[in-house]
């Protein structure tokens, strides 16, 4: 049996335990609305008993630990799902922005309507006699206006997508900075946790702060974390450590020249110890992955389709226009396109145009002052043997005199080709099996190669009389205008016509958006359920805390009363015994 003073210790231990319980309960209530806070509870165990006969006799209670109510497995699952949700949420926002630019609900405002109006203008022009009448010029000016609007709309659509891409890049850069800040703070908390727990305590509040940072990090990027024996954690993105104990490793945004200078994500500052590693392809999940996916996959896909539309429109129109004839013939003409080096063959990188050249022939028709064809010049082209310089020489030599013939060709500004004829002569182009006229941009309706730079050729923009509606130049021949108007029925690579292409393109955007919305809604529900489960475990319940507060308050009062009783016993022992006759 314990002595009287040992019994007093039993009461004091109960008092201390009850006081600690009240303390923790108050801490929970105070942090009711603290984001990331995990409810704490006291672990109470009995003191080691006093092993005496006929014992053992208990010596009261002790506070074994203050722990957080936290489910690490559930928390990691929630972080993974949060990364996925934020990825889809980021895509959803981007798709909303993209769809705004291609909203075809308002008739007359979309690119699809511009395409129809453009081809209708060619069709209207084909029904007009190829003459200098007012009607002819009005319809030619209408075609110029519709074509200009169309090219502006294609460029605008491309620039809108590129604008989102540039914003993606800026967002990636901003998110890298945020990830670096989070990694730095996690590493610092690692140091604090290890220091605090080195004496055997559990750093509950510090762990909450660190877990909150991990929660924030999961919104930006998916990662894997593992805890070490000293309480510190390591954080890995794609198998690369951004947090290792109390150190953090930075990520960097680096321009990729092979991807239009868009940012790739690199780990490491460089040098022998930390060589820079491109981890862009290792990143999955999180908002930053949504930025990458939007930029490289979705917008990459849409700009590629716009480029196909623009390129097909340019090539198909120019192939017909280049061998046609307008109200006027040429006394000189300069090509739209040049080469890097005119001495190199067409099949070599520095000698080629943006469009391929075939082995074949193009024809030039020379007209005299009486508007009669005086001669046809057939210019043979072989991309394996010819260069721009050799074609220039062939044209200049076509009349037999390379320096003083009726037709001459010269190397012009930006390594383009210029063709002129002697005074009183004019010329037109005829059939072309070599594709040289289209590749060089001679007698073209459009210039440019893609959605980025498609535009109306200055030749027809400045003088609608050069619009090549005819194949022969004879009265009543508007066959070329009709042929060009029928380009809308030409199939593209995906077996849809130009006329159908844009509808298919807009439908693709709508389909992609619907798919993204579905995945977002699904992930949102999953995250909400997981948050609810984790909150039920770690969240502070006022009802439960009130119950605990009353429980510990009653325990404190009971132990205080017990101590009072023991104190009275001690007082009796000391002051009320041992004096005879008192």
Image (cartoon, rainbow, N blue to C red):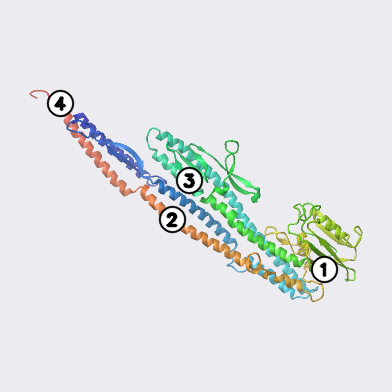
Q: Position of residue 156 (x, y in %)?
A: 65, 59
Near-viewer residue (237 or 116): 237
Dot 2 corresponds to which residue? 526
Dot 4 corresponds to which residue? 575
| Mark 3 → mark 1, Cα distance in angstroms | 71 Å
Q: Nearer the viewer, mark 2 or mark 1?
A: 2
Near-viewer residue (358 or 50): 358
Dot 1 corresponds to which residue? 328
Q: Earlier in the sequence, mark 3 or mark 1?
A: 3
The label on residue 472 is: none
Compared with residue 240, is residue 325 higher up or lower down, i.e. above or below? Answer: below
Circles 2 and 4, Cβ within 8 Å, touching? The answer is no
Compared with residue 388, is residue 373 higher up or lower down, i.e. above or below? Answer: below
Q: Position of residue 341 (x, y in %)?
A: 79, 51
- The quadrant where residue 503 appears: bottom right
Q: Earlier in the sequence, mark 2 or mark 4?
A: 2
| Mark 4 → mark 1, Cα distance in angstroms | 133 Å
| Mark 3 → mark 2, Cα distance in angstroms | 20 Å
Q: Nearer the viewer, mark 3 or mark 1?
A: 3
| Mark 2 → mark 4, Cα distance in angstroms | 71 Å
Residue at 83% across, 55% down: 389
Relative placement, left or right, of 237 versus 270 is left
Q: Residues within 10 Å of mark 3 (few under 14, many from 20)?
A: some
Q: Residues within 10 Å of mark 2 (few under 14, many from 20)?
A: some
Secondary structure beneath dot 4 equals helix
Dot 3 corresponds to which residue? 224
Secondary structure beneath dot 2 equals helix
Q: Earlier in the sequence, mark 4 or mark 1?
A: 1
Relative placement, left or right, of 514 versus 14 is right
Relative placement, left or right, of 167 versus 470 is left
Placement of the N terminus among the 4 image quadrants: top left
């Amino acid at each position: 049996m314990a002595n009287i003073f040992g019994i007093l210790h039993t009461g004091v231990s109960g008092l201390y335990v009850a006081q600690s319980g009240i303390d923790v309960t108050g801490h929970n209530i105070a942090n009711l609305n603290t984001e990331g806070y995990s409810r704490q509870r006291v672990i109470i165990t009995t003191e080691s008993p006093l092993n005496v006969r006929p014992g053992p006799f208990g010596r009261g209670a002790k506070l074994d630990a203050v722990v957080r109510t936290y489910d690490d497995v559930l928390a990691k699952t929630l972080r993974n799902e949060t990364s996925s949700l934020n990825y889809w949420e980021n895509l959803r926002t981007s798709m909303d922005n993209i769809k705004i630019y291609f909203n075809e609900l308002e008739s007359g405002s979309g690119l699809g309507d511009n395409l129809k109006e453009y081809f209708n203008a060619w069709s209207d022009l084909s029904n007009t006699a190829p003459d200098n009448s007012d009607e002819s010029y009005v319809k030619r000016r209408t075609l110029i206006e519709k074509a200009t609007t169309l090219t502006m709309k294609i460029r605008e659509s491309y620039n809108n997508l590129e604008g989102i891409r540039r914003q993606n890049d800026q967002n990636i850069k901003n998110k890298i900075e945020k990830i670096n800040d989070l990694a730095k703070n996690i590493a610092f908390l690692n140091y604090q946790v290890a220091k605090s727990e080195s004496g055997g305590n559990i750093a509950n509040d510090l762990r909450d702060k660190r877990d909150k940072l991990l929660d924030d990090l999961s919104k930006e990027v998916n990662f894997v974390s593992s805890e070490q024996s000293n309480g510190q954690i390591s954080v890995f993105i794609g198998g690369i450590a951004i947090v290792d104990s109390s150190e953090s490793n930075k990520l960097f945004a680096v321009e990729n020249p092979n991807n239009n200078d868009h940012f790739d994500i690199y780990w490491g500052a460089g040098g022998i110890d930390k060589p820079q590693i491109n981890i862009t392809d290792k990143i999955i999940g999180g908002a930053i992955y949504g930025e990458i996916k939007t930029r490289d996959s979705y917008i990459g896909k849409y700009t590629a389709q716009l480029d196909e539309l623009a390129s097909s429109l340019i090539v198909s129109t120019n192939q017909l226009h280049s061998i046609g004839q307008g109200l006027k013939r040429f006394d000189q003409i300069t090509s739209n396109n040049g080469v890097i080096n005119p001495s190199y063959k067409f099949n070599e990188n520095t000698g080629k145009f943006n469009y391929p050249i075939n082995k074949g022939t193009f024809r030039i028709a020379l007209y005299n002052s009486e508007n009669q064809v005086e001669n046809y010049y057939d210019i043979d082209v072989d991309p394996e043997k010819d260069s721009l310089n050799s074609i220039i020489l062939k044209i200049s030599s076509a009349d037999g005199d390379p320096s003083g013939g009726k037709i001459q060709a010269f190397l012009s500004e930006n390594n383009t080709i210029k063709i002129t004829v002697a005074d009183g002569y004019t010329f037109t182009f005829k059939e072309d099996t070599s594709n040289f006229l289209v590749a060089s941009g001679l007698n073209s309706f459009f210039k440019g190669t893609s959605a980025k730079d498609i535009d109306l050729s200055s030749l027809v923009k400045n003088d609608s009389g050069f619009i090549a509606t005819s194949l022969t130049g004879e009265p009543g021949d508007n066959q070329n205008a009709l042929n060009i108007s029928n380009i809308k029925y030409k199939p593209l690579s995906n077996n849809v016509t130009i006329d159908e292409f844009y509808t298919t393109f807009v439908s693709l955007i709508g389909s992609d958006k619907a798919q993204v919305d579905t995945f977002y809604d699904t992930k949102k529900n999953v995250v909400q359920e997981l948050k609810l489960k984790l909150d039920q475990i770690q969240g502070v319940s006022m009802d439960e805390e009130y119950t605990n507060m009353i429980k510990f308050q009653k325990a404190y009062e009971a132990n205080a009363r017990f101590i009072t009783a023991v104190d009275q016993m001690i007082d009796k022992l000391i002051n009320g015994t041992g004096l005879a006759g008192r």
